[in-house]
Image (cartoon, rainbow, N blue to C red):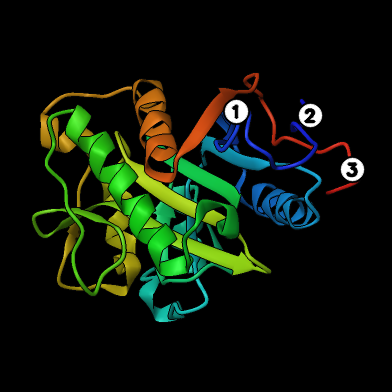
Amino acid sequence: MGIPGGQAAGSRLGIRRLDVVRLLGRTPYFPMWERQRALAAARERNEIGDLLLLLEHPHVYTNGRGGQRQHLLVDEATLSRLGASYVEVDRGGDITYHGPGQLVGYPIVALDGLGVAVRGYVRGLEQALIRTAAQFGVTAHSVPGYTGVWVGEEKLAAIGVRVTRGVCYHGFALNITPDLTYFRYIVPCGIANRGVTSLARLLGHSVDVDEVVPVYVAAFAREFGLEFHWGDRSASPPHTDVGCG
């Protein structure tokens, strides 16, 4: 499937367009990271418009530029037993976990068109996640001094981004029905005195990831004043028609 190309102008006068792609199955982390960088470069050149990729990863621990290796609490043999991998990446923040049952979102957007700087963009990501949780009856909040979305002392969603030449990529991970035991093997986000939770745990019943997807898309579009358009579902990372990736 191709990513919609062309200029970044909105689909209606004064409103920017956001193309949304929901990837099916489990998307391996490393190829998706490479694809993000290629798409971000294409966005810098204005060859594609703003884009939101929504997906699930297989079990993987990722550590950001500010992370510490010792926050991964297991060795390679244990990682292999868990069926998990470990990747050091170029986003901000510390170590986190991605896996099935977790909605991962990678907005690839030009910040100048959104009218926000990096800090305002991250706050907007938090607000979109807070609104999403509220639609399922969960009262979530942000915490001064920490990035992400919380319910009490437990993190419901993690956020980590990278900005290059005004284009942002990486994004968020919202815990819907993941196996929370995988967080035992790390110091999540480098914060030792707080826990991790999920929508399913808070609600006391399972929640399907695809039930959350449209709710989040609407919240993200509302937060940043975008008009969203659904792309076709895809079983593999999207590609551009401009030689990226």
- Residue found at x 47% / y 46%: 59
Give the residue at mark 2: 2
Give the quadrant of residue 40. Answer: bottom right
Q: Between tags 3 and 1, which lies in front? A: 1
Picture coordinates of residue 89 (x, y %)?
58, 67
Q: Position of residue 64 (x, y in %)?
A: 50, 71
In the image, residue 8 above or below residue 111: above
* Residue 15 placement, left or right of 172: right
Residue 216 relative to residue 47: left or right: left
Q: CA distance from mark 3 to mark 2?
A: 10 Å
Question: Which numbered circle lies on residue 242?
Answer: 3
Q: Nearer the viewer, residue 38 or 10?
A: 10
Q: Residue furthest right?
A: 243
Q: Earlier in the sequence, mark 1 or mark 2?
A: 2
Circle number at residue 12 = 1
Disc 3 to disc 1: CB gap under 8 Å: no
Amino acid carrying mark 2 in the image: Gly
Q: Amino acid at mark 3?
A: Val
